[in-house]
Image (cartoon, rainbow, N blue to C red):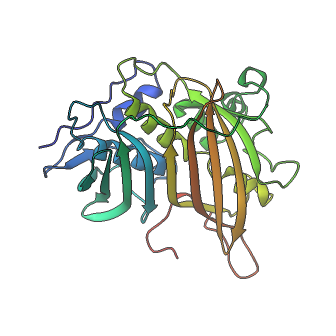
């Protein structure tokens, strides 16, 4: 049996709940693992959780040959069905390739034998190379911006109360949030700061920090697309689902540091929208690039949205 990847538990809540969920247990097969889920007001598993768990499941199968741990540098995932947070999730890993510098793994997440997510992740030994990156934009610092937590406390709504109690990361939108109303201008650009609410354990490996970034980013990735269409999270009849997720890690991540998301949405069409993000740390280092495509449906003369948020639901087309 393959030992699950070690994820130390944070002592402060709600971050502690996230780290405990990311700590998988042994499954039935050699490279199989089991995971649980955090409760969700939508009644479906949060997509970022499954991708982060899959990243850690694959990392557990990598062999340290003495040259150091191979760190995740890219992940490509497809959501196929909505998951039930009350049922365990089985993660089965296939060892595709182990080269001199890179390793690739295919991971399938299933419930009751039915796949809900399929992903391929790649890992690399630490190596020297050219250091080039885009500069971080000059935007207001997080200390100058209202926290989403403060906004949630002013909203008399079950979703706001749930997020205020369970959100493990502090979010601060430079252009203002779109929780209660659309942005003043329909533009597909967004900047926000984000960091963990609580101390990430010192013994947490870099792979765990990268998994935490993967976990949280799904909360905000499609917001630039909503802004570009003049929508907001409480738009009547809107249904939203993440279809796929691609992410690259460029440099070490510190989930306890403020991270700046520089986001845009270049296109929306046919009920689908694509969104991108460059993630910088507080010193201006580019640590990750992320892309997602999502389904965004709103009522029209012939169709209407379901009013549900989450990952794709089985049977939807």
Q: Nearer the viewer, residue 206 or 44?
A: 206
Q: Number of numbered discs present?
A: 0
View extreme (right): residue: 184
Q: Is residue 3 above or below residue 204?
A: below
Residue at the image position 65 percent from the left and 71 percent from the top: 271
Name above or below for residue 258 compared with residue 64.
above
Asked where in the image residue 138 lies, by quadrant, the reply is top right
Q: Is residue 288 above or below residue 252?
A: below
- Residue 8 relative to residue 162: left or right: left
Is residue 29 visible in the rendered structure shown here? yes
Residue 56 placement (x, y as % from top left): 33, 41
Does 44 sit left or right of 87 as displayed? right
Q: Position of residue 262 (x, y in %)?
A: 69, 42
- Residue 190 falls in which quadrant of the image? top right
Front one among 297 and 290: 290
Q: Is residue 211 above or below residue 141?
A: below
Residue 234 in view here: no
User: Looking at this view, is 59 or 132 the one in front?
Assistant: 132
Q: Position of residue 35 (x, y in %)?
A: 29, 44
Which x, y percent locates residue 52? Answer: 41, 44
Classify residue 275 as left or right of residue 186.
Answer: left
Q: Quadrant of the N terminus?
A: top left
- At x 59% / y 62%, what residue is drawn? 294
Q: Residue furthest bottom?
A: 302
Does residue 231 appear left or right of residue 14 in this picture?
A: right
Residue drawn where x is 78% and y is 57% of the image: 228
């Amino acid at each position: 049996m393959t030992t699950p990847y070690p994820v130390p538990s944070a002592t402060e809540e709600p971050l502690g709940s996230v780290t405990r969920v990311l700590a998988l247990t042994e499954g039935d097969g050699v490279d199989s693992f089991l995971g649980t889920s955090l409760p969700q007001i939508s009644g479906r598993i949060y997509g970022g959780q499954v991708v982060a768990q899959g990243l850690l499941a694959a990392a557990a199968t990598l062999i340290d040959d003495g040259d150091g741990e191979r760190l995740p540098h890219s992940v490509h995932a497809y959501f196929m069905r909505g998951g039930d947070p009350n049922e365990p999730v089985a993660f089965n890993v296939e060892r595709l390739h182990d080269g001199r510098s890179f390793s690739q793994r295919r991971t399938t997440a299933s419930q009751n034998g039915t796949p809900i997510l399929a992903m391929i992740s790649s890992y690399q030994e630490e190596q020297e190379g050219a250091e080039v990156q885009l500069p971080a934009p000059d935007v207001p610092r997080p200390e100058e911006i209202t926290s989403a937590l403060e906004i949630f406390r002013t909203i008399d709504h079950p979703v706001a109360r749930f997020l205020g109690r369970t959100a493990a990361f502090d979010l601060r939108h430079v252009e203002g949030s779109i929780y209660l109303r659309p942005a003043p201008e329909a533009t597909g650009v967004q900047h926000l700061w984000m960091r963990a609410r609580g101390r990430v354990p010192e013994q947490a490996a870099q792979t765990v920090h990268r998994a935490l970034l993967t976990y949280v980013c799904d909360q905000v990735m499609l917001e630039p697309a909503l802004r570009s269409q003049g929508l907001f999270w409480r738009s009547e009849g809107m249904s939203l689902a993440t279809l796929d997720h691609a992410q690259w890690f460029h440099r070490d991540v510190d989930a306890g540091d403020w991270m700046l998301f520089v986001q845009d949405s270049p296109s929306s069409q046919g009920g689908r929208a694509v969104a991108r993000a460059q993630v910088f740390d507080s010193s201006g280092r580019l640590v990750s690039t992320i892309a997602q495509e999502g389904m965004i449906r709103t009522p029209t003369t012939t169709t209407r949205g379901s009013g549900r948020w989450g990952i794709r639901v089985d049977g939807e087309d």
